[in-house]
Image (tube, grey):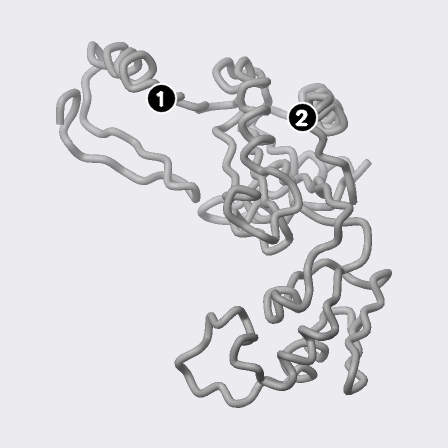
Amino acid sequence: DFRGSGLTNMHGSTGDIIFLGTTTPQLEEIFWTLTHDLKQDLGGSGSNLRTPADCLGSSRCEYSCYDTQALCHFLTNEYQDELHRPAFPYKFKFKFDGCPNCCVASIARSDMSFIGTWKDRIRIDQDAVNKYVEKDPAYPANAGAHKGRDWGPFDIEKEVTDLCPTHCMKWDGKKLHIDDANCTRCMHCINVMPRALKVGKETGCSILVGAKAPILDGAQMGSLLVPFVPVNPDNDYEEITEVIENIWDWWMEEGKNRERLGELIKRQGFQ
């Protein structure tokens, strides 16, 4: 209302706000007000690094395998130049998911996604597994998300082991067995029985590249580049920034104008 028409528009899959109906002399005033008075970062637009997005991560979620907000904040500050000064062939997006539940949907929407994972075994509390099987009211399936509806009694084979995408789980009537070598970290079993199963202790993230979700056509999912990388704030996330900057160097050298990273990978191959 103060600087424009009072109308706004939500743009893109992350809901960026566009202020409509202003005039050219007002633009610099708007930038000054937002950045200096309201202390807001305006993010990026054009062929540059776009504003990163993350899930709540370790601040709220027991499934989080790394501190998404800390990594997102660090990379936002580290790459301020790339955010505000277009130097890329086209736009580039970071997104951060603390676990494979992918609440931010980074695997589908970002040129480089960081998805929490673990290297060791899923932790199993066999006593708690049996509580779920015995239908103990203190152990509701799906953490009670579906209570209040008549879904019938909990069936661990029908609802957990048979739905495992790689069939790496087996219930022998007393114990739950998991072949961790064939586990794809889909999180389904952990979501259904969160008090019995937990992510491993040796956590980090996987790096995927090349996703995009345009409005009309050409959507593609991210491809796995680095299966596991430690997320270590003590060395300023050196293992992660090394991957990022090498990818950027290759993309800026080989990418055509207005060619996303995923399109370059599709054209030249996944090296």
Closer to the camera in the image, 210 or 228: 228
Q: Position of residue 244 (x, y in %)?
A: 69, 27
Left or right: 49 as drawn, with respect to 165:
left
Q: Earlier in the sequence, mark 1 or mark 2?
A: 1
Residue with the mark numbered 1 = 40
Report the Cα–Cα distance between label 1 and label 2: 32 Å
Element assignment for label 2: loop
Q: Position of residue 256 (x, y in %)?
A: 64, 25
Asked if residue 254 shows in the view, the reply is no
Who's the residue at 68% across and 39% down the image?
209
Residue 250 badge: none
At label 1, counting other C-alpha atoms closer than 10 Å, the crowd grade (few under 14, some 14-19, many 20 or more) is few
Left or right: 1 as drawn, with respect to 95:
left
Who's the residue at 18% across and 35% down the image?
7
Q: Position of residue 84 (x, y in %)?
A: 48, 16
* Count of marks overlaid on the render: 2
Q: Position of residue 226 (x, y in %)?
A: 78, 40
- The amino acid pointed to by label 2 is Gly
Asked if residue 151 shows in the view, the reply is yes
Q: Which quadrant does the C terminus fall into?
A: top right
Closer to the camera in the image, 262 or 18: 18
Q: Which quadrant does the N terminus fall into?
A: top left
Depth-wise, is mark 1 or mark 2 nearer the camera? 1
Closer to the camera in the image, 34 or 14: 34
Q: Is residue 163 above or below residue 267?
A: below
Q: Is residue 28 above or below residue 176?
A: above
Q: Based on the displayed image, in which of its 4 quarters is residue 194 positioned?
A: bottom right
Left or right: 215 as drawn, with respect to 266:
left
- The amino acid pointed to by label 1 is Gln
Residue with the mark numbered 2 = 255
At label 2, counting other C-alpha atoms closer than 10 Å, the crowd grade (few under 14, some 14-19, many 20 or more) is many
